[in-house]
Amino acid sequence: MGLPNIKAGRNGKPQHSDGFRSSHRLRTGICLALTFVLCFLASTVAAFWTDINGHMHVLEPVSLTQAHKAPEDIYKGRTLNVLVLGQDTRDGKGNSEVGGSGDGLEENHQSDTAMVVQIAADRSYVNVVSIPRDSIVNAPACTTSKGDTIPARRQVMFNSIFAEGYSQGGDANSAASCSLAAVRSLTGLDIQQFVVADFNGLKSIIDALGGVDVCIPKDTWDGYTGINLKRGLQHLDGTQATEYARMRHGTAADGSDIMRTTRQQYLIKSLVNEAKTVNIYSDLPKAYRLATTSMSTLQLSEGLGNFQTLLGLGNSLKHIDTTHIYARTIPVEEWSQDNNRVVWTDEAETIWHLLREGKPLTQANEDAESASSSGNQASNGQDAQSAQNSQSAAQTAGNGSDTGGGTQSPSASAAALPKPDPRTGLITMPDKTLIDPNTGGTVDPDDGTIRDANTGQYIGMADRYLFATVCAVPAQR
């Protein structure tokens, strides 16, 4: 089998699915990502903007009924899976200003962020699963937009799939389509759509929104990005927010890509919260800037590239509760051949199975607790049977309420668990450990990061906890 190619060499690649092409050419290179948010903002604001124009009668003449009719969500009643790719490039002035330039970086096209975004069929929740760029995976063959086939590869770094697709195909369509084919092969998910954005695209959209409020858990400084933020509630402009999302070093990071994904998920929720506070009807210039900037900076697959499609999708999502945006990083552990790389754990299949079934990520922890209870119940049953064989008379007389030598029954144990705090959403255990009920992970009280209880790897950020405690923002946020 040989050593894995972890530097994205030229010897093989993913598989390109037919029918994927960008709705417009890549203009300034590659992306950072968080583009579920960008897509959400673009479509939601555009939906409002259409309604505004209907009120003002500045569109082409239509009846009042037509003007007020909400756009149709063409995916209504269906689960929608979207691969969101964030590209790290310095190609173009805007990207070089945010990401830096020099040392050949202008020719570098990497996918630093990848998220599988699943929008529930009934639009009641959204799952966001981050795939670390340093994951070692097997990539199927794919075809570039030039018609060239990139052979399959084994044990390559995940972000090399995007890079090689771009290198061989020369465009974002090839890169995104190869990444999409790989994710479909790795997860078994039916993913038909993708979104790509670069540094400048993310920066521009956040600036059009007017910035974003983020609760910074600790003083944050990073010499690589130039970010310098104080602990507490901060209103970040586009450049600051983009640098916060992409930083990996400094006082509030550990150098890992895994920790960076938690901040990207965190920024997604903060952006959605910010978008919900925008009064579109009283700030028409902002609405126009946000809609036009979003539409011009995103690279969308054909199934999302139609303006009316985005209008309909945005209209169906505009009332979503941000507490029902469930985000986590796919469970990983260190790779045995290189501790700077990671591989997915067995629990990853549990996550992908939930998405294939169209269920919320919170179901994973509920299922784990149920399985644990069933296991305990079976074990207790065996103990009780053994005891019954030797002491049946005594048990019949009155030990039914304390079977197993006084061990509490699983149902009683579950009932005794503390309930989540309505403000923070977390469970405080008797020993003061904070538990995230959605993932079962432990929460660091200082910075709100959530770690896998088994591997210790970062899997998310307790955003409600940070806003409620560190920054004391009212719960209605």
Image (cartoon, helix red, strand yellow):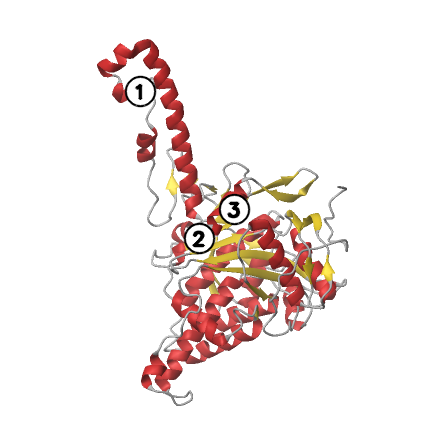
Judge left or right: residue 185 versus residue 78.
Answer: right
Task: From the image, tell me which residue sits under label 2.
Answer: 358
| Percent of width and height locating residue 215 | 46, 56
Judge left or right: residue 115 versus residue 111.
Answer: left
Disc 3 or 1, which lies upstream in sequence? 1
Is the C terminus in the top left, top right, bottom left or bottom right quadrant?
bottom left
Q: Which mark is residue 403?
A: 1
Q: Which mark is residue 10?
A: none
| Percent of width and height locating residue 272 | 44, 63
Q: Callout 1: 10 Å neighbours few (<14), some, many (20+)?
A: some
Residue 258 visible in the current orientation: yes
| Percent of width and height locating residue 132 | 60, 50
Residue 210 visible in the current orientation: no
Q: Nearer the viewer, residue 433 or 300?
A: 300
Three-letter code, disc 1:
Thr
- Whole-Å distance between the Cαs marked 3 and 1? 38 Å
| Element marked by disc 3 | strand
Task: From the image, tell me which residue sits under label 3.
Answer: 459
- Whole-Å distance between the Cαs marked 2 and 3? 20 Å
Three-letter code, disc 2:
Gly
Disc 1 or 2, which lies upstream in sequence? 2
Is the N terminus in the top left, top right, bottom left or bottom right quadrant?
top right
